[in-house]
Amino acid sequence: MRPRSDPLPRELEEALDAVRARLGVLGTSWLYYPTVGSTNDVAAALAGAPGDGVDRLEGAVVIADAQTAGRGRRGRTWFSPPGNGLYISVLLLPGRARPSPERATSLLTLAAGVAIAEGIERVTGLGPQIKWPNDLLVGRRKLAGILAEGLAADRSAGIGHVVLGYGINVGLMSVPADLRERTTSLEAELGRTVDRAAVAAESLAALATRYDDLLTGRFDAILDAWRRRSPSSLGTRVTWAPGSTAGAVGTAAVTGDTRSGLTAGIDEDGALLVRTSLGTERVVAGELTWEI
């Protein structure tokens, strides 16, 4: 059961009204919470509600001012204090893409990274870089993160929802000591106040555009935009666990329980390519350490 939502704050409603023509299927319903455990969990509960068809649920948006149980990839906690960040989850159906629903689903996180960076840039002029697969950075510090979680397929439609969640650090905030050297915010980078509602609206409008690219098979547009924003995807040394690779092109260099090499871009399905002295591997998931 999902918690009861509040009305959208006036400033957020006005910002969303200003971009409504660009939201496409996003915003079929809105749920707003001053505080919630996790926007992804609320969106997942929404998808599991009895009597709700997949078409009606596609594009539902959950927004929170704070999270008490926000999370990132691999179960990490996402620091989500009130009044400083944006915490948003959207229910999507990339599996209905024509052509290639599998490819559309595999590229969803990359498409979201491009979209959120574009929305931030439109509002603030700041152009974040993207670190594969789901982090937005300014310099070496993390500005935003993305978490896509698949849900069980609907039996009648044969496709399943994906909850696409993202968090953006907007305001100046007090962060735990262990995060101070690794995180940043829009206001910290710009030295001025940033309109959180405008960032929310523009990030969703940009996401709607890139989601439409996925659904209509404009994959090259997404991949090209992602590559332009990710200098670390070429020539950066990384190490990773052997279990996080698939579809090896060659034989990877192995050191103990880890492998290492230099990034060599991404392939057409969004996998990270890593070149070693013995060959090239596709990294599709898992824990990477970046020397940047």
Image: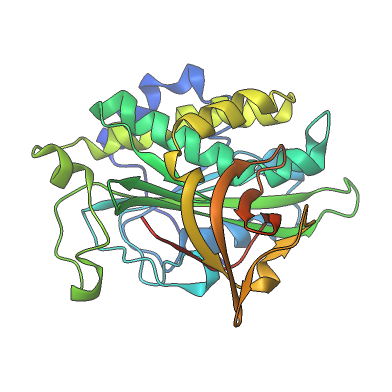
Give the number of callouts: 0
Residue 146 percent location from the top left of the image: 48, 52
Q: Is residue 264 above or below residue 81?
A: above
Is residue 163 found left or right of 33 in the rendered image?
A: right
Placement of 257 over or under 52, stated as above or below: below
Relative to 99, 2 lies left or right: left
Colour style of the rendered protein structure = rainbow
User: Where, quadrant-wise, is the N terminus in this rendering?
Assistant: bottom right
- Indicate the quadrant containing the C terminus: top left, top right, bottom left or bottom right: bottom left
Farthest residue, direction bottom: 256
Nearer the observer, 108 or 22: 108
Residue occupying the point 71% across, 37% down: 268
**Residue at left offset 27%, top offset 62%:** 182
Residue at 58% x, 35% y is: 28
Residue 39 in picture, x, y percent from top left:
47, 58
Residue positioned most to the front: 277
Whether residue 88 is visible: no
In this rendering, position of residue 193 left or right of residue 96: left
Percent of width and height locating residue 29: 54, 40
Q: Please state the horizontal and vertical placement of residue 94, each as a whole percent of the image.
A: 72, 40
Query: Which residue is pictured at 60% across the width and 29% down the height?
Result: 222
Viewed as shown, does residue 40 lie left or right of 64?
right
Q: Residue furthest top?
A: 21
Residue 179 shows in this picture: yes
The quarter holding residue 242 reads bottom right
Q: In this rendered view, identify the residue nearer to me: 160 or 136.
A: 136
